Image (cartoon, helix red, strand yellow):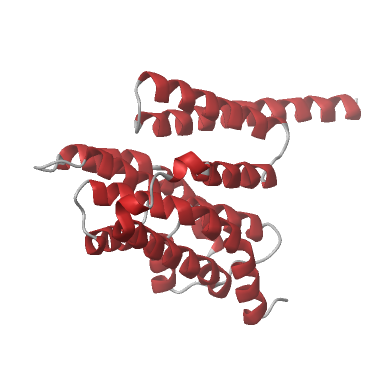
Amino acid sequence: MSTMRDDIRRGLSDIWPAAVAAAPIGLLFGAVAASKGLSPLEVFLMSAMVFAGGAQFAAVELWATPAPVAALVFSTLLINARHILMGASLAPKLQGFSRWQKFLGLYYMADENWALAEKRARTHSLTPAYWFAMVVPFVAGWLVNSTLGATIGAVLGDPKRLGADFAFTALFIALVAAFWKGRVTFWTVAAAGIASAVTYRLAGPPWHVAAGALCGLLAAWLAAGSEARAQAVAIEEAEA
C-alpha cells in the first residue's frame, strides 16, 4: 500500500513530461493573446479562470472589439464538451476525495492529468496526494508560461518555427499508446483522427473537436460490440 509521500512522488514523476511539453504552448498562447491586446494580468486571469488551452486559443483567435460573446461562449462550450465524458469517467475513481477536493481537482482537470489518472487507476487507488501532485505543478506551469509569453510578447517569436507546437502531439501519441487495447483502440483512434482532420480542412475549428469526439465514440461502440459478439461466438464454439 502506497504512502502519501509515495503518491506525491509518483504524481510529480508522471506529470513532469506533460508540464515540459506544455511550456512552449503556454508561451505561444501568451504571445498570441498579447498581440490581440490582452495585458499580462489579463492573460494570467484568463489562464487561472478558464484553464483550457484549446478553448483559450480559440477565444483569442476570435477576439475583437466589441467581443463576439456568443461566438466565444459557443466555441468554448464545444471544445470543452469532452470534459463531461472525462469527468464522468474519472468521478467514480475519486472515492477518497472530499467534496471540495473533487470540485477543485476536476475544475483544473486537463487532458494530460486525466489520462495519467485513468492509467494510474488501473493498478492503484487514486488519492488526493497523487492527483494534486500532478495538478498543482501543471497548472502553475501554465500560469507562469502564459503570463511570461504575454510579457515578452514579440521578443519570443513563433515557437512553431522550432517545432515546439508538436510537443503536445507527441505527448498525446505516447498517452494513446499507453491505453492501447488492440483493435478497438485502433478503430477509435483512426475514426476520431480522420474525422477531425477532414472537418478541420472543410469547416475549421472548433468543429473538428466535436467531429473527432463523436466519430471516435461511435467507432468505439461499434468495435466493442463487434468484439463482444466475436468472443461470444468463440465461447459457444468452444463449449459445443
**Residue in front for this viewpoint, 202 or 109:** 202
- Residue 46 image point, x, y percent: 27, 58
Q: Is residue 211 left or right of residue 38?
A: right
Name the residue located 56 percent from the left edge and 75 percent from the top edge: 129
Residue that lies at the very extreme toward the top in this rendered image: 202
Q: Is residue 232 left or right of residue 222?
A: right
Q: Quadrant of residue 68?
A: top left
Q: Is residue 201 visible?
A: yes
Q: Quadrant of residue 229?
A: top right
User: Where is the N terminus found, in terms of image quarters?
Assistant: bottom right
Name the residue located 27 percent from the left edge and 44 percent from the top edge: 59
User: Where is the C terminus found, in terms of image quarters?
Assistant: top right
Q: Is residue 236 above or below residue 90?
A: above
Residue that lies at the very extreme toward the left in this rendered image: 66
Q: Is residue 212 above or below residue 9?
A: above
- Residue 188 image point, x, y percent: 59, 31
**Residue in front for this viewpoint, 230 or 125:** 125
**Residue in front for this viewpoint, 74 or 161:** 161
Residue that lies at the very extreme toward the front in this rendered image: 155
Q: How many marks?
A: 0
Q: Is residue 50 visible?
A: no
**Residue in front for this viewpoint, 186 or 20:** 20
Name the residue located 28 percent from the left edge and 38 percent from the top edge: 75
- Residue 189 image point, x, y percent: 59, 32
Q: Is residue 164 left or right of residue 170?
A: left
